[in-house]
Image: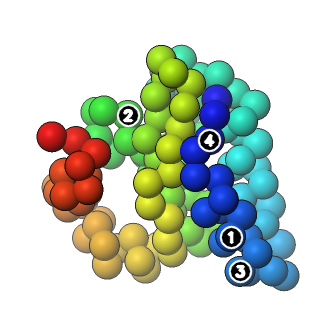
Amino acid sequence: MRLIGKPRLLKLRKKNIGNDRLANAIKDFIADFEKKNWSNEKELKMDRPDADMIHSDSFYFFDIHVHRTLVSVEYETQEATILWLGTHDEYETTFKNNKDSIAKWLRANEYIA
């Protein structure tokens, strides 16, 4: 699967030099996406049990140590795009920890209609 937006993860890793747990979590996240060719949510969740589908158009949140990342997964084209990345606190501030706020954010950023 092609991971679009990988430089955002690499920048986060560089910004947090010395945080080995975060660096390893980022490395594992990137490796999972680049080595796998998932065809559905069931396969994705087998490899990434932290995948939390938050919209039926294949939008997921993933845990990366103390961070969360919002990813759009396109099984047909084998592309995953990082749409948002932040700490758990930033996630709660931005998305209010509920699916309605997430859907509103997705609409406002023209990811869904």
Q: Quadrant of the N terminus?
A: top right
| Amino acid, disc 4 | Leu
| Amino acid, disc 3 | Lys
Dot 4 surroundings within 10 Å: few (below 14), some, or many (20 or more)? Answer: many
Q: Which mark is residue 2?
A: none
Label 1: which secondary element: helix
Residue at the disc numbered 1: 11
Label 2: which secondary element: loop
Residue at the disc numbered 4: 3
**Which numbered disc flags the more N-terminal residue, 2 or 3?**
3
**Which numbered disc flags the more N-terminal residue, 4 or 2?**
4
* Nearer to us in this view, 111 or 90: 111
Residue at the disc numbered 3: 15
In the shown orientation, is residue 37 left or right of residue 86? Answer: right
Residue 109: give x, y in percent of width and height. 26, 56
Label 1 vs label 2: CA separation?
25 Å
Q: Residue at x 19, y 58 (%)?
A: 108
